[in-house]
Image (spheres, rainbow, N blue to C red):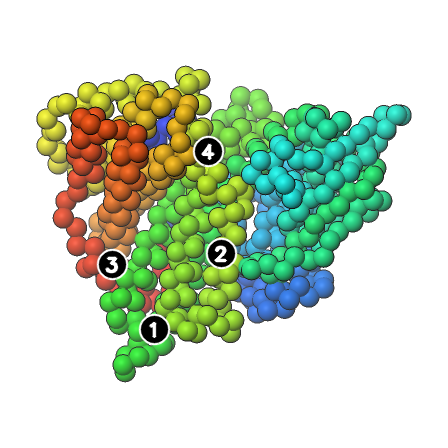
Amino acid sequence: MDQARAIVNLPQGGEFLIKTPNPFDLFIPEEFDEEQRMIREMAEQFIATEVRPLMTRIDQLEPGLMVKLLDQAGKLGLLGAAFPEKYGGMGKDFITATLINEALGGGNSFSVAMAAHTGIGSLPILYFGTEAQKDRYIPRLASGELKGAYALTEPNSGSDALSAKTTARLSSDGKTYRINGQKCWITNSGFADVFTVFAKIDGEKFTAFIVDRNVPGLSFGEEEHKMGMRGSSTRQVFFQDCEVPAENVLGQIGKGHLVAFNILNIGRLKLCAAALGGAKHSASITIQYANSREQFRQPIAHFGAIQHKLAEQAVRIFAIESALYRTAQLISQKEQELTREGKPSGDSLLGAAEEYAIECAILKVAGSEALDYVVDEGVQVFGGNGFSDEYEISRAYRDSRINRIFEGTNEINRLLIVDMLMKRALKGNLDLMTPALGIQKELMSIPESIPENGPFSREVDQVARMKKAVLMVAGTAVQKLKASLEQELLMLISDMIIQVFIAESTLLRVIKWTDQRGMDSGKNQIDLMGVCLHESVSVLQQAGQEAIQGFAGGDELRMMLVGLKRFTKTDPFNAIAVRRRIASKLISENKYCF
């Protein structure tokens, strides 16, 4: 089966808000082929046998240990899996690369070090480097002979990366650039051999450079003592008259933002994949503890309050997984489409990720927050033991927190979701206003009854009405406030959009799965989808209500609240009983099993 097969009329990024895709065109995790399953098992086995037993030593930053583990991963082919074969990689497709990131996600600090190396530490050179640069660095990065790092953040430039103060000046003979400045929070900086560094040429032209570790004038601060991800090497990097060859300019002079921001789109999806892997592992150890811990002469897994937590962990994991692989397939398909149009392979993948940058931002936010929920409730199930470093869930809790800051804070990503949608609408690439205006007219009409056309017709209609709620709120807010939309409103609208994408992805997955295997075989998935949809509508309704009250008044306020109530109306749903069925399956399997 060609999992990345071309689809006629491949949807545009963000188009999910105004069109309903065919579920049978989507890739779902149940469709991984045998090779992909074997690669996942190898990666998971590596984490279980080589990484997890050493986690305490890793957290203590034992000299040479992280490098040794990365070397072992390189020998297994895990570092170069997604790199082209011509540069020593395995040339695996984007879906497989995403699966590897997920499988390694339960490796805590090791996962961060590896993701930094294979992602932001290597991809800028692979996608923006000259052939000479790629030939020099990529084969050695793919094998692990060289370790990569990415130096963008500065003490006074975090989310505002373009305000960086690090400078680069060309020598009089035109052969070298002299770099001066400071970077902070640089992952892998304690051992990396090659850095992608961003500096402003003559203090103005934001540009990327390849900087080798042995360059004179390059120095490092002490290891940061962090709340979480303690085993990930994180230092400040100082540049004092570092002379870098002119041929080490990466990409075009003055176009460093293209390197920085395009790599972030892929990084956000990869972060979601790693968060998913971490969430699955944390959910499993929570289930196992609930089965083994006894109170009042029975396992605490028998108590309804605990079952609620276990089931809710599973619902959020299943939903994020559905959205993640839906997006991975879209990027893979778009990459193939751009390649057929004649674009080089690197440009094709970057262009595909840029097309679905909205979806990548959604995944980053939703994935990191789902992991936070899973580990937080995991600590609660462990009780006092969860607060002890002797138990693995304690480390998972600490390590999870950084994911809401990595790859652009969740606040920045929420703002970007709406900003990117509006920009695409203004450019005419995405027609949001026509359906938004149509919804305003619909508010004046009598609602039609829902036709019964299939086993999931009511759920499909519910998601369609959720989209109408988003378009109603966002469309009216933009019309009234135009460019002066307050950040609080943008964040609320973004939350509504996130709920739509996650809920629809979960529903589409279940529709396709049950069509292939039958309703009986998909009973657990139907339960997971039902709770997901039930909760998504509730979150969307609350966010919509708060947003409407933030910009509307009088008759308009009353009309929009009535419209929101219509669009978020749901049938009675016994979430307690459904969660108990989900929990029962988890408890019997003694692990996350969906």
Residue 586: image x %, image y %? Answer: 32, 64
Disc marking residue 400: 2
Q: Are marks 1 and 3 in contact (CB under 8 Å)?
A: no
* Quadrant of residue 455 within the rendered picture: top left
* Labels 4 and 1 touching (C-beta < 8 A): no
Q: Which one is in front, 329 or 65?
A: 65
Q: Separation of disc 4 and disc 2 at Cα? A: 22 Å
* Residue 107 position within the rendered picture, expressed as x and y whole percent measured from the top left: 54, 59
Labels 1 and 2 touching (C-beta < 8 A) = no
The amino acid type found where label 3 is placed reads: Arg
Q: Residue at x 86, y 28 (%)?
A: 171
**Screen quadrant of the C terminus:** bottom left
Instruction: Judge by depth and name the residue closer to the eye, 202 or 248.
Output: 202
Mark identifier at residue 291: 1
Nearer to us of marks 1 and 2 is 2
The span from disc 4 to disc 1 (Cα, nearest Å) is 42 Å
* Between 136 and 14, the one nearer to me in the picture: 14
Query: In the rendered image, which residue does mark 3 sit on?
Result: 579
Measured Cα–Cα span from mark 1 to mark 3: 17 Å
Disc nearest the viewer among 3 and 4: 4
Quick one: quadrant of the N terminus? top left
Identify residue for label 4.
416
- Upstream in the sequence, badge 3 or badge 4? 4
Gap between marks 1 and 2 measured at Cα: 24 Å
Q: Nearer the viewer, mark 4 or mark 1?
A: 4
Q: In the rendered structure, which disc, 4 or 2, sits on the residue that comes first in sequence?
A: 2
- Determine the secondary structure under disc 2: helix
Amino acid type, mark 1 = Asn
Res 456 → quadrant: top left
**Dot 4 lies on which element?**
helix
Label 3 close to label 4 by CB (< 8 Å): no
Q: Residue furthest bottom?
A: 297
